[in-house]
Image (spheres, coloured by chain):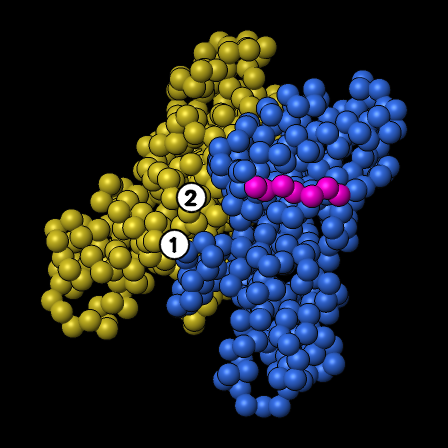
Chain colours: A blue, B yellow
Amino acid sequence: MKYCFGVDVGGTTVKMGLFEFDGKIVEKWEIVTHTENEGAAILPDVAESIKQKIKKYNISLEDIYGIGMGVPAPVSAEGIVYDSANLGWKYKEVKKELEELTGMKAEIGNDANVAALGEMWKGGGMGEKNLVMVTLGTGVGGGIIIDGKVLTGAHGSGGEIGHICVNYEETDSCGCGNHGCLEQYASATGIVRLAKKKLEEDSRDTMLRKRSLSAKSVFDAVKEGDEVAKEIAVSFGEYLGHALANIAVIADPTIIVIGGGVSKAGEILLPYIEKPFKERAFFANLDVTFALATLGNDAGICGAAKLILE
Amino acid sequence: MKYCFGVDVGGTTVKMGLFEFDGKIVEKWEIVTHTENEGAAILPDVAESIKQKIKKYNISLEDIYGIGMGVPAPVSAEGIVYDSANLGWKYKEVKKELEELTGMKAEIGNDANVAALGEMWKGGGMGEKNLVMVTLGTGVGGGIIIDGKVLTGAHGSGGEIGHICVNYEETDSCGCGNHGCLEQYASATGIVRLAKKKLEEDSRDTMLRKRSLSAKSVFDAVKEGDEVAKEIAVSFGEYLGHALANIAVIADPTIIVIGGGVSKAGEILLPYIEKPFKERAFFANLDVTFALATLGNDAGICGAAKLILE
């Protein structure tokens, strides 16, 4: 047994990787996600693509340990998805179907949890066993690793930290139907929302008025010393840092890894999160370190590979 | 191997139990906790007491699986305590010392975590594997069980839910040095604090003005239909219910067990917590059930026994 596959199913593409046991990527590639017809083709397409690679590399089936897969939905301990809006799936026994289609062992996990596993294995959290990963993208995803294992929870929705309430006074709705979720302030969309509000309330001159607003343009302005942009970053960091202090007192990690599109702003991001974290952290959690994710788009396939190797 | 010991070390007494493997309590008893001299006598006293019981019941050492122990401090995975104000301990290799003193295998855990394990095994959470327990006493303790295992965390301070921040505007200090911790609103002391504030701000007649204020007198007044007391209970329940909604979105439990002295108010407590929980819970957590702890003072010794049996 020398190889495994890591598969990261997204709403538009499926990222895939062939891995050696030690984590080395032999090849990575993508296929299109066919979400029509309740996503009926997704698993057969994945199976077919895997079979092609096995043929291409002339790998014996005995040398393949199995397939790990991350999907954008809560996943039960039995590898069942009950609903995935992004893929069109309703009730689907993903693990069982993928095993039947390929004849290989499969493990399925939530994509944000799987990405956390990837960053622990080969990325920003390498060497740690107790880790919280926050993915700041269109939404806010999260993955929590306790003693080397993903916190899956009873419904497979453990670590859904984007939906911690951080503002009980909020009147705008989150996508989940609640009000005041972390996602409304710390996602790329949330940062734009904070910026718009700031520009409405604040009459000072700022380069943000001359640019199209995005998380990137806000942090670019921060880098250029724009005071208004800095105050937006402070506000973002307070919501996120305070939420992470509450998460730390529950999960007690050694490291918090920040990933997702927003994290491309780089190291400049971290002090904005760390300062409010330290102000509010329980004393036992004050030595938590912060790091940026380093695997980028590969976190999903790496974590998926790790999922099956465990 | 047919027996084990469960030990629950508190600041004034050490509760102890001799258990059969299936959980039946053969005998339970208490000894005094000698905290003087940095608590040097505590472990020798426990060891001596265990030896007496072994002699009394004429149990062969091969029939004893070991000793589980809960202590009022964070405990590392190696069974080390770094500081326990309640016991006088500084750095102490508790597992190692207890094993040397008794010649038996020992497992050490934080007392709140261990109580959660007890309630899962034989109490209010029986049969569940993903459980959050809140202990509402002088402070607010917590224990989180994920897939049957205690969430210990990197510093042994996992599940310290009393120190989640629930009010960023709070000016009074918590014992931990922070401001706005759940403990300031949901502990017995916190409920008295809420009641005092209410009585200062509210001029209505209430039976609470004629009684000495305690968590018990507040909930007694609730049971008698006192409107002011009910509003205090609503406030308590909102802080606790909202905090539990945030905990649920991270830990994804099936059940939340409410224990500690405050829980002696009984079933009347639960709707005050459940309503605000449901208002703020993530949709995946809406089917979480609430239960009262049932083991009372035995939760600690039962959980400690379970700790060594695992």
Q: In this view, does A112 lie above or below A212?
A: above
Chain under disc 1: B
Tell me if residue B298 can be seen.
Answer: no
**Tag 2: amino acid:** Asn
Q: Where is residue B80 in the image (x, y as percent from the top left)?
A: 64, 39
Question: As rendered, which of A276 and A139 lies closer to the eye?
Answer: A139
**Tag 2, which secondary structure?**
helix
Q: Residue B61 carries which label?
A: none
Chain under disc 2: B
The residue at which mark 2 appears reads as B285
Pointer 2 or 1: first along the chain: 1
Q: In this view, does B100 lie to the left or right of B108?
A: right
Q: Give the range drawn in magenta.
A: A30-36
**Mark 2 vs mark 1, CA separation in Å:** 10 Å
Q: Residue B280 carries which label?
A: 1
Q: Name which residue lies at 60% across and 59% down.
A: A138
Judged from this view, the residue extending furthest toward the bottom is A204
Q: In this view, does B182 lie above or below A92?
A: below
Give the quarter of the image for residue A287: bottom right
Give the quarter of the image for residue A277: bottom right
Question: As rendered, which of A11 and B42 lies closer to the eye?
Answer: A11
Q: Position of residue A225 (x, y in %)?
A: 72, 82
Are there few (<14), some (14-19), or many (20+) residues within 10 Å of tag 2? many
Tell me if residue A29 can be seen.
Answer: yes
Q: In this view, does A211 lie to the left or right of A76?
A: right
**Tag 1: amino acid:** Arg
